[in-house]
Image (cartoon, coloured by chain):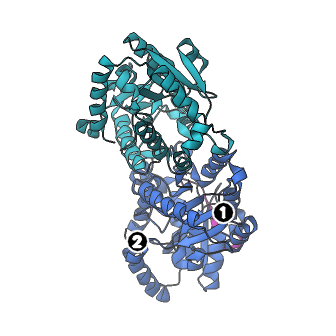
Chain colours: A cyan, B blue
Amino acid sequence: MSQRRVKAELSEHKADTATKEGPLAIIAGGGTLPATLAEAALAKDRSVHVLGIRGEADERIERYPHTWLKWGEVGKLFSTLEDQGCRDLVIIGAVTRPDLANVRFDFGAIRNLPLLLSLGVGGDDHVLSSVVRFLEAKGYRVHGAGDVAPELLAAEGPLGAKTPSIDDRQDIETGFRVVAALGRLDIGQATVVVKGRVLAVEAAEGTDAMLARCGELRKGRRHRGPAGVLVKAPKPGQEERVDLPTIGPDTIERVAKAGLAGVAVAAGRVLIAERAAAIATADTHGLFLVGQMLPRDQDA
Amino acid sequence: MSQRRVKAELSEHKADTATKEGPLAIIAGGGTLPATLAEAALAKDRSVHVLGIRGEADERIERYPHTWLKWGEVGKLFSTLEDQGCRDLVIIGAVTRPDLANVRFDFGAIRNLPLLLSLGVGGDDHVLSSVVRFLEAKGYRVHGAGDVAPELLAAEGPLGAKTPSIDDRQDIETGFRVVAALGRLDIGQATVVVKGRVLAVEAAEGTDAMLARCGELRKGRRHRGPAGVLVKAPKPGQEERVDLPTIGPDTIERVAKAGLAGVAVAAGRVLIAERAAAIATADTHGLFLVGQMLPRDQDA
């Protein structure tokens, strides 16, 4: 789905919500973002109902009106949405990809079996866009977290005190090119480039594991000082409402441990969890943290 | 450099060697391939002189006429080649990328400083093609191991007892597409695809580390039986004379440990170390091992 269409739907949603009073449903995975989003919505006088995925979502969601769901409780998901009068959804937070063989499905899941079976194959983006299409087919409006709370997205330019050097800027350009190429194959959203060399590419292991590997690979070269960059950006054509790349203070800590010089993310298209703490962590370690506007954003 | 040009040079070389008697210089990194290549050359009545890189090459190269070199002994490399009357070179075997800060350069290296400095930046392919151009500029002919001993290259079709299933074939196709896209960015030569999903992509960490990661990522899903494929192929435009992807029995063992169903390599463009042992290992674990002719070979 194009950025344009997302924006069109959002304006429609804004028009709607003026007349419609159902709470915003937040389907919550792990990390701090679901709670941050709930706060942001409440600050804008939008009521919320958080649907926490057991084993994924943090207990702090219990501060808000909430329901816990297990993987496979598809029927309970829909009955909760109906009981709460929710028509608008945001899906946010980290989830592990569940092993479908260990998931117990409720009756609502059995009724939706063809979709669930289709989730077993393909890349992440295939799975997530199936979920969005499924929810839309049921009449729900799926929104991006950034549509509800744009302040969660990375701004353009240096976010902390440090700015990238000319060498860093070359690594950043290479990194964005690599991520775009990977994304076209639905592989990953991140890469590490050090002095023109692609040190690591993220696929299923996630950013944290990739950064740990980079630390190992750079052992013995650390005396030369920090070099290289972590680059994160959504895949081209990615379902950006439900699967935006995310960084936070932990990411910055791992970047420092890996001996890199900084982090570059696609401005407006990457979520920053605990923004103030993330920037403070970058400043403490002398790392740059920049948002870069990507060409295709100009189309949106 | 194009395949065509390599082949043209090779025929020239064949014409030359009929009249020219210098031994074939084998610049040897790690593993069994340098010794296998020396055997293959000797079996064809071509004398050899092995230049073993200290800390990289196996001691078994001492069975052949040889000289040990340390990283940085560029002057000694050229004096040895001259003393032995070598004009034809093969570079073969695994090397770690040396940390130039820890390398002690001899006078021959100092004289070639501009090239050596250029090795510090860029992807692997950039480095290796610089080395080849450098040696060629010095008047040496650089050959691929497969030009000297084609039997070291993967043949087309199933190499062992097992053949890939229809699902495996889809993963193989995806894998070759991914490797081609990665290669255009000078990233890596290998990927793991499981049921349509790109599980891992190799960059600087190498195939072994990538396979170890895949084993971790597939934990908890192993009860469903082996699935997925390791795909290896050279990068498009890669300097195939000095940096062909290589697999061997160890690779096959790691593929089995990762819970994959088999291995697919570009036929004629991937080296197989200890071929018989590699095939026997695949058969023991019930894995397929196939060589696939890639479209661009038809141009060569």
Q: Which residue sits at x=59%, y=21%? A: A58
Q: Which residue is mark 1?
A: B31
- Residue A30's place in the image compared with B37, above or below, is above
Q: Residue furthest right?
A: B284
Residue A242 locus on image (x, y percent): 44, 34
Residue A191 locus on image (x, y percent): 46, 41
**Magenta segment range?**
B62-73
- Residue A128's place in the image compared with A152, above or below, is below
Which of the image's four quarters has the C terminus of chain A? top left
Which amino acid does the dot numbered 2 rest on? Arg
Q: Which residue sits at x=38%, y=35%? A: A168
Whether residue B69 is visible to the viewer of this picture, yes or no, is: yes
Mark 1–mark 2 contact, CB under 8 Å? no
> Mark 2, residues whose alpha carbon is within 10 Å: few (<14), some, or many (≥20)?
few
Q: Secondary structure at mark 2?
A: helix
- Cα separation between marks 1 and 2: 29 Å
Could you tell whether B46 is left or right of B160 in the image?
A: left
- Judging from the image, mark 1 belongs to the subunit labelled B
- Judging from the image, mark 2 belongs to the subunit labelled B
Residue in the foreground of this view, choosing between A134 and B300: A134
Q: Secondary structure at mark 1?
A: loop
- Residue A193's place in the image compared with A79, above or below, is below
Residue in the foreground of this view, choosing between A222 and B161: B161
Which amino acid does the dot numbered 1 rest on? Gly
Q: Which residue is mark 2?
A: B296
Which of the image's four quarters has the N terminus of chain A? top left
